[in-house]
Image (tube, rainbow, N blue to C red):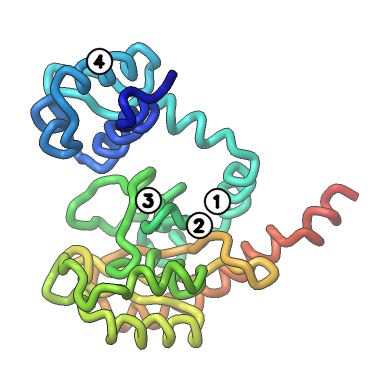
Amino acid sequence: MLTTGGGPSVADRMFTVLEACAASRRPLTLVDLGELTGLPKTTLHRVCWKLVELRVLEHTESGFEMGARLYALGAMSPNLRRLRATAMPLMHTLVARSGWMANLGVLYERCALVVDEVAGSVQLPPRERMLGTTMPLYATALGKALVANGPQRLREELCEPPLLRPYTRRTIVRTDLLREHLDEIARRGYAISDEELRLGVAGVAAPVLVDGELVAALALVGPSDTAALRRLAKHVQLAAERLAAALAPQAVELVAA
């Protein structure tokens, strides 16, 4: 049995712990996990060490952190493998043209999940990898490109509260303004985020639409530079359109033939 006394199942508890570790940029102790998940320490001890035994979590002197096994299992998805492989040459071209970091993201629950990246020559503050991390839908170019072109239900859920959490002084927190902003993104075909998640960092992204359906989004991330964002928008749009064309069913049929 996975459930006990009508409470959360073992699987629920495991995923609660995994999501907490995945969202953290440092190893988490049992005390940290208790504060983040609300689970009892005895339960956390049992769950964490079982996840270590399964090689999903790793344990160091600093605490528990994500291992590579779960990412490796996720990367075995045929659709994700094809998306990443098809996008990679286009991402390298964007990086060569701009010097900025290129990101490939998909919708994951109410976040943008970065499934691949190519580092650029321009240094960003902080200089950390984004691969495998989740980004807010309203404070990043990647997230805004996804939510503006994704299911209407998701946009309504995001804009349901009157105010959202600010990440910087430039984050759009009023959802009445965000609605208008997302409508404009859908019309023009690209999204810009300028210091809305981190000061000094900006991005431009475009949706990858296959037969009118959102599949992913491509983005460039670099220093705050309004002129560069506008200039690079057309290149990101073109790369997203080429990726969509390569992913289209008719393209697969031609390759198979």
Name the residue beneath numbered marker 1: 88
Q: Earlier in the sequence, mark 3 or mark 1?
A: 1
Q: Which of 149 and 222 is in front in this view?
A: 149
Name the residue beneath numbered marker 2: 91
Question: Which quarter shows the N terminus?
Answer: top left
Q: Residue at x 26, y 43 (%)?
A: 23
The disc label shown at residue 46, or none: 4
Left or right placement of residue 71 versus residue 250 in this view: left
Asked whether disc 4 touches disc 2, contact meaning CB atoms under 8 Å apart, the reply is: no
Circle 4: residue type? Arg
Q: How crowded is mark 4: few (under 14 residues within 10 Å), some or many (20 or more)?
A: few
- How many numbered marks are there? 4
Q: Is mark 2 on a helix, strand or loop?
A: helix
Alpha-carbon span between mark 2 and mark 1:
5 Å
Alpha-carbon span between mark 4 and mark 2:
42 Å
Asked whether disc 2 touches disc 3, contact meaning CB atoms under 8 Å apart, the reply is: no
Q: Residue at x 69, y 66 (%)?
A: 245
